[in-house]
Image (cartoon, coloured by chain):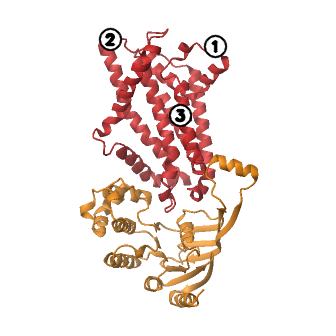
Chain colours: A red, B orange
Amino acid sequence: MKYLKNFYKYRGLMYEIVRKNIKLQYRDSILGMFWTFLQPLLTTIVLVFIFGNVFGKSSSGVVNYPIYLLCGRLLYEFYSQSTKRAMRSIRNSASVIKKVYVPKYIYPISNVFSNFITFFISLIVLVCFIVFFCVTGNNPPHITGYIFLSPIPILILLILATGVGLILCTLDVFFKDIDYLYEVFCLLLFYMTPIVYKIDALKISNKLFSYVLMANPMYSITEMFRCCVLYGKMFNIHHLLYSLGFALVSLIIGLIVFYRKQDKFILHI
Amino acid sequence: MSKPAIEVKNMSMMFNLNSEKVDNLKEYFIKLLKRQLHFTEFWALKDINLTVEKGDRVGILGFNGAGKSTLLKVIAGVLKPTQGSVKVNGVIAPMLELGAGFDSNYSGKENIYLYGATMGYSRKFIERKYDEIVAFSELQKFMDVPVKNYSSGMRARLGFAIASAVEPDILILDEVLSVGDAKFRKKSEGKILSMFDKGVTVLFVSHSVDQVLKICNKAIILDKGQIIASGEANEICDTYNKMVSGGK
């Protein structure tokens, strides 16, 4: 109850930080906010150009590869950007935290949120892609009522990013090495998640390796999202349970770790 | 008798002084294995008991490193005491370092809202106070300029204007009156004196005995983390002056 009251008092700060992050992200660039959807658009074109010939025309052939790729990329980009920003948030706000009392969780959480909003704006690109392919009739995505289930994987991803962000920013206060390690981890995650390729196209014979790929919660989340907006079918319930469980556990661990260590932050930043 | 504004009970604050700073994993594990992780305990504050009644204006005197700023940080809630408890009744406006919450890429106007939010005030409240803040800081022409282009004096002025506009119950001043030019210093002193009439409680840290005499009615002297004297401001200032001239 006390925490809720405190959060209510500082909700303005959360709003201001989210606002600030979004406003400052593209300040001084000529195209400004346009970059939120210009950037995924351009990078997707590059990736389609590079990987399209290798993975685009694989066995299942019927799937629209640009949309397939964009779905994966948007979700991955949100996850990696928000967790990286959250990780550095406490260090970056050291000057404030050392001088004024503020609830510290505001910083990682508002960084995840501001990325969530830019992610939402960048979904416009996906909508444009879907409309474009539907209108031209060139391998259109299968749009059905299941598209209304697409917020579910997005919400799970938000929970996951918040939890991981809390864990990372706590670690980052004590060991700055995490910055570099996590950078490498994100690169690994990019290739471990079926973003540019399809998992069945890999024809993996090694059982262990395929288990590792399946254990990646990003895999289940991206697959669920694609089911909603691309395949037009109900997603696998196991994916839902696994990713939701994973996200909730990481959120709980994040909250516990953060709560237990937050009073020590100031001695290390 | 109303509740005291600030109640500090048997409060101690301990820091671990690393003999060497360890901030990466490799070093940490190597040191851990070699058992070289020495921490030297350092008690910045020891067994502090302090009660400040509402409307009291307490000056905190002491030499460098006596624990003055640490005491203020503990009261402001920035540091959590190692032992003991701190109870605060009312809204605190910390002026520990003016402009600490500013984002240098943000304009002056945007920073007013950001800084206000950092202190826990709603956007609406700051909107009401906005004109007053700008007028007091005398920075009307610079409100749309990023703060990174401000001079340090301008930053301090804006910081002071925001922090003083919010009508706190408890005001914490850490050598802030030494910023800005003489004119602004006078203005900010005037502003603080006018807040006294509204019954604000003040904690004031300064090296200047004159300022303490002008602003405070009570004072304490901190030395090596302990309160060695407390009482009426003029008596304590005499003691402090003797300590200073005593060549300690």
Left or right, B159 with respect to A253, comes to left
State the image coordinates of residue B46 (x, y, percent, origin top left).
66, 73
Amino acid tagged 2? Gly
Q: Residue at x 39, y 51 (%)?
A: A16
Residue assigned mark 1: A205
A63 lies above or below B105: above
Left or right, B141 with respect to B5, comes to left
Judge by depth and name the residue closer to the eye, B7 or B96.
B96
Amino acid tagged 3? Cys
First reached walking from the N terminus: tag 2 or tag 3: 2
User: How far is the residue under mark 2 from the one under mark 3?
Assistant: 36 Å
State the image coordinates of residue B123 (x, y, percent, origin top left).
36, 55
Asked which quadrant contains residue B83, the reply is: bottom right
User: How far is the residue under mark 1 from the one under mark 3?
Assistant: 25 Å
Amino acid tagged 1? Ser
Instruction: Mark 2: give few (<14), some (14-19) or many (20+) Cα within 10 Å.
Output: few
Residues at circles 2 and 3 in contact by the CB criterion of under 8 Å? no
Secondary structure of the residue carrying tag 2 is loop
Secondary structure of the residue carrying tag 3 is helix
Instruction: Mark 1: give few (<14), some (14-19) or many (20+) Cα within 10 Å.
Output: few
State the image coordinates of residue B88 (x, y, percent, origin top left).
54, 68
Residue assigned mark 2: A137
Asked which quadrant contains residue A115, the reply is: top left
State the image coordinates of residue B72 (x, y, percent, origin top left).
53, 70
Residue assigned mark 3: A186
A238 lies above or below B139: above
Residue B79 visible, this orientation: yes
Task: Provide the chain ID for the residue under circle 2.
Answer: A
